[in-house]
Image (cartoon, rainbow, N blue to C red):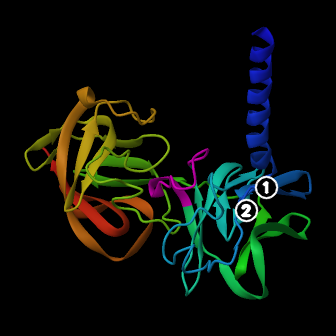
Amino acid sequence: MRYGSIAFMLLLILAVLSTDLPAQDRKILSPRDSVFLSLDTNTISVNYGRPSMRGRKIMGDLVPWNKVWRTGANQATHLRTNFDMTLGGVPVQRGLYTLWTLPSPGGWKLILNKQTGQWGTNYDERQDLARFEATTKTLPAAVETLKVVLEPTGKTSGLLRIQWETIEVSAPFEKNTHIRPISPTDSSTATVDEKRLFVKFSKPYMRGRAVWGVVVPFDSVWRTGANLATIFSTESDLVSGNVKIPKGSYTLYSIPAEKGLTLIMSKRPGGSQPQYDPSLDLARIPMALEKAPAAIDPFRIWFEQLDGHAVMLKLGWADRVYSARLGVQH
């Protein structure tokens, strides 16, 4: 009986091993790969899945036109740079990003996104760092398996190439230790009854992204700028409609909507981190929406003088301008 049990276990082990062997020998359809390029003392790399044509039509079929593509297979494609640079003319600070493309018969866009570590179908447009036009050309011979190339063009510059089927998409990059801040700080001032109004804010750029409803979601509290909280101060008591604003320093937040924007004056001290606390609300002011006569980029906050006693406070970005009247409280 004991020998029969041992024989049965041996047969079971052989059966399991025999079923595992084909799986071990099976070719991975979209293997993971990485490419690296050293420039001076710095490195840029791309990690991606490499699908093959395998007799399929790729562009416009497996890779649909006018839809964001993972630029590879399986997990999202990742680009890492340990130096500040410009990529396709866009400032990119050192770090890890995901790399996406938007294919079109008339031209391709490259997309850098701040979300990392996700599967390649999990794309969040709201986290785009930038979108920019890429150079496309037709290759003389088909490339069977997707290929990413990092090619040096100088001591501190290179070219990113993406090749598959008969399409090549490319963008130049260059080390730049003096890139402008992605959202630089700015300010605006005005006077009412010879008393000073002041606003200090960060200026995010569009960088090819859709702004309203995407980068800035509708019906959610927004920091009304970027980075540190936006500061508003007044040396005089003000009114906006029926809303009273005592002299002092405040933090500005807002809630954008399809047809307007609600400006929030918060008693949180100016210059602090932009975490929003509704218990610190001083006032909520409705701002009227108008279409910008020309695209506004970067984001702006400014005053337009109405007379010696009142100004129009305006916020503008992309195709929208929001405004509210601020006057002296008598």
Left or right placement of residue 153 versus residue 132 in this view: right
Q: Position of residue 87 (x, y in %)?
A: 70, 66
Which residue in the structure is indicated by mark 2?
50
Left or right placement of residue 98 versus residue 282 in this view: right
Distance, label 1 to label 2, CA atoms, is 7 Å
Left or right placement of residue 298 versus residue 108 in this view: left
Q: Position of residue 8 (x, y in %)?
A: 74, 22
Which residue in the structure is indicated by mark 1?
33
Q: Residue at x 77, y 29 (%)?
A: 11
The magenta-colored residue range is 115-129
Q: Where's the C terminus, which quadrant?
A: top left
Kind of residue sitting beneath label 1? Asp
The relative height of residue 20 versus residue 73 in the rendered view (above or below) is above
Kind of residue sitting beneath label 2? Arg
The answer to whether mark 1 and mark 2 are in CB contact below 8 A is: yes
Q: Residue at x 38, y 48 (%)?
A: 199
Left or right placement of residue 185 versus residue 133 in this view: left
Observer-nearest residue: 265 or 56?
56
> Which of the two labelled residues, at mark 1 and mark 2, occupies the earlier sequence position?
1
Observer-nearest residue: 248 or 295?
295
Q: Residue at x 31, y 29 (%)?
A: 277
Query: Local crowd at mark 1 within 10 Å, few (<14), some, or many (≥20)?
Result: few
Residue 53 counted in the magenta span: no
User: Main SS of the magenta segment?
Assistant: loop
| Farthest front residue in view | 1
The relative height of residue 280 versus residue 76 in the rendered view (above or below) is above
Q: Position of residue 82 (x, y in %)?
A: 78, 48
Observer-nearest residue: 156 or 303?
156
Q: Work out whether residue 178 can be spotted.
A: no
